[in-house]
Amino acid sequence: MKLKAILGGAAATALVASGALAQDRTLTISVYAFAQDEFKELVYDPFEEICNCELVVETGNSVERMSKIEANRDNPVIDMAVMSLHDALSLSRADLLQPIETSTLSNYDDLFEVAKDPLGNGEAVGYTLYATSVVYRSDKVTIDSWADLFQNDLAGRVALPDITTNQGARVLWMLGKAMGDEDMSLAAPMAQVGEKADDIATFYQRSSQLAQLVQQDEVWAAPVGRFAWSRFKDNGLDMVWAEPAEGQFGDMNVMVMPANIPEENAELALEFMDFWLSPEIQLALAEAQIDSPVNSTVEVSDEAAEGLTVGADLIESLHFMEPAVILDNRDQWLNDWNDTVIK
């Protein structure tokens, strides 16, 4: 869907009022490399036109982004960045972020509660989220619980994410819930995975790798993020998105502002955040199958919703692992994984 067809007056009016008087302003943002052609068309170019400013876009992974923010602590070269929630907390703990003045965001009140203050300290705002569940071949097996990943019929045909991926620890968490053990050491589910290691076809790191294994009939079931569902639902096989008894888990990407950026840059960063969170932009990105919206007023078409995480009931039911838990435990999880599962 073209942005020009849906970009309404609300976002435009607010930005024209604040941006028309300012000339030659520059905003440097750091984002993921994913779908940048679409972001340019749907977000960047329209914002530049409305704010009468220049948007400098840097792309890269979270490690590169975080390192650059840390290396330029006193003289920031990035005005706004997007990243995972636990990476944002890592920067926050190092005093590298500043509070976001949400009172200046006209769309803030329309966000789902989970996206409003996900760090609990006012230093991040969610802009997209996604659910993860189990995708499986319904002509081969049935999945009603996360525990069903270890059923006999799936021996040798199930894949799990590696512990180093964003979903790895969360999948163990859900397996623990199915076992009745929610200790965040994840010792019990990790031991179970270790015992069943010979029945696991692979511990994958990329959804594209998993999609190929499913297509080749080597894998019948695996946890998958909703953002990757399209790789599976249209592959010609009998694929189903499970609704396990224990629920689905969620993850979120957030917007942050580095500490010590100039006041005028902070003001422009807030304008850009508000623009991105507007119903028009959130809808455009959703209809383009790029991001699931966090603006609760957005109504996505049924066709687009197939590949997204949408709906208040679903979003409110998702299990979100606290980012502090991830930061405080990930090194130990990796050590335990190597000792228990890889061995």
Image (spheres, grey):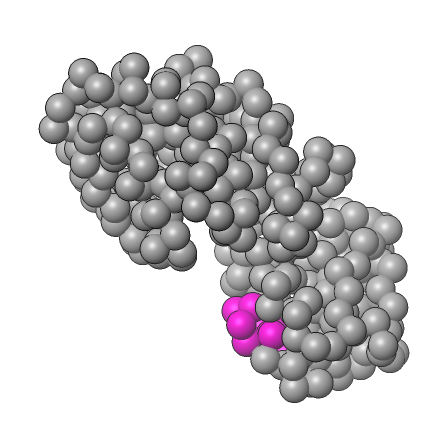
Q: Quadrant of residue 35?
A: bottom left
Q: Quadrant of residue 135?
A: bottom right
Residue found 43% across the figure and 33% down from its top: 7
For residue 55, side relative to residue 113 (left or right)? left
Magenta segment boundaries in residue numbering:
200-211
Quick one: which residue is furthest to the front in this view? 5
Give residue 16's position: percent from left, percent from top.
29, 20
Total numbered badges shown on the rendered structure: 0
| In the rendered image, the vertical position of residue 202 relative to residue 78, given as above or below | below
Q: Quadrant of residue 137?
A: bottom right
Does the magenta run of residues contain 197? no
For residue 40, side relative to residue 314 (left or right)? left
Residue found 45% across the figure and 39% down from its top: 5
| Front residue of this view, candidates 40 and 244 | 40
| In the rendered image, the vertical position of residue 16 relative to residue 320, given as above or below | above
Give residue 15's position: percent from left, percent from top.
32, 22
Residue found 25% across the figure and 49% down from its top: 58
Give residue 37's position: percent from left, percent from top.
34, 55
